[in-house]
Image: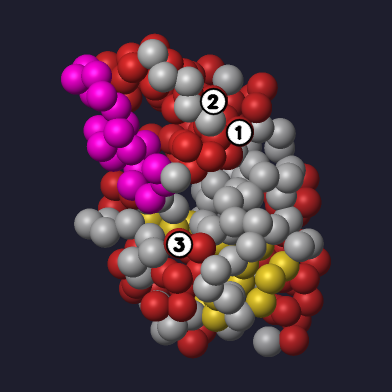
Amino acid sequence: MKAVIFDFDGTLADTLPICFFAFQSVFKEYDGRDLTSEQIKAMFGPSETGIIRENLLHKSHDEAIELFYEKYSEKHDEFVEKNEEISSLLKQLKSEDYKLGIVTGKAKRSLDISLQCLGMEGMFDVEITGDDVDIPKPHPEGIHKALAELGVSPAEAIFLGDSDADILAGKKANVHTIGVQWLPNYQSLEFTVQPDEVFTSFRELVNLLKKG
């Protein structure tokens, strides 16, 4: 095994609460709609800009997108705690010469905000965001791009994610696919498509790589 590729929201960082807050702020401000977290979650797939352009009734999409990023950045530290276990895990994997990647539906702009706030800048060998693909997960395009940039085959990589879309994308890309439920907030309580494994602690990933 040469590469470990992660989804981001709900997998590497407990960022779902700040995502929900920022989207709720936008839909309240521009449409006067009070949306629940579940209603927001049902829109996931495209990047934030795509979600707003596809779902906001108000025509001021560009202004609404700016408000999203303003709220996301302004409240990030309040909503998202740094996770020392994840930081230690990433450092350990890097020290053992694994190539690390992110494949996320997030736009590059919000990913960069989160990586900076969480002290994860420079940790990854490749970052594929929603801006970098034509078709979001569950299509495997993002994972294929990450594998190509890392220079590894599907058999040499694992992909970890917290949603059905992640599991489907990993399966379609023919990589060993792991569903994770190791953070307080994650997207799928039960996977409708069965991953190769389900991890509820970071130690399980370390143990898997030791065996591999």
Mark toward the start of the polypeptide (3 vs 1): 1
Specify start and end residues of the magenta stretch as a single range.
43-61
Numbered mark located on residue 148 in the image? none
Marks 3,1: beta carbons within 8 A: no
List the residue tagged with mark 3.
165
**Label 2 sits on what residue type?**
Phe
**Camera-side residue of 33 and 124:** 33
Mark toward the start of the polypeptide (3 vs 2): 2
Q: Which quadrant of the figure contains the N terminus? A: bottom right
List the residue tagged with mark 1.
17
Asked if 46 appears above or below 57 in the picture, the reply is below
Q: Is residue 209 left or right of residue 43?
A: right
Q: Position of residue 15 (x, y in %)?
A: 59, 38
Instruction: Label 3, secondary structure: give it.
Output: helix
Numbered mark located on residue 21 in the image? 2
Q: Residue at x 38, y 13 (%)?
A: 32
Marks 2,1: beta carbons within 8 A: yes
Instruction: Label 2, secondary structure: give it.
Output: helix
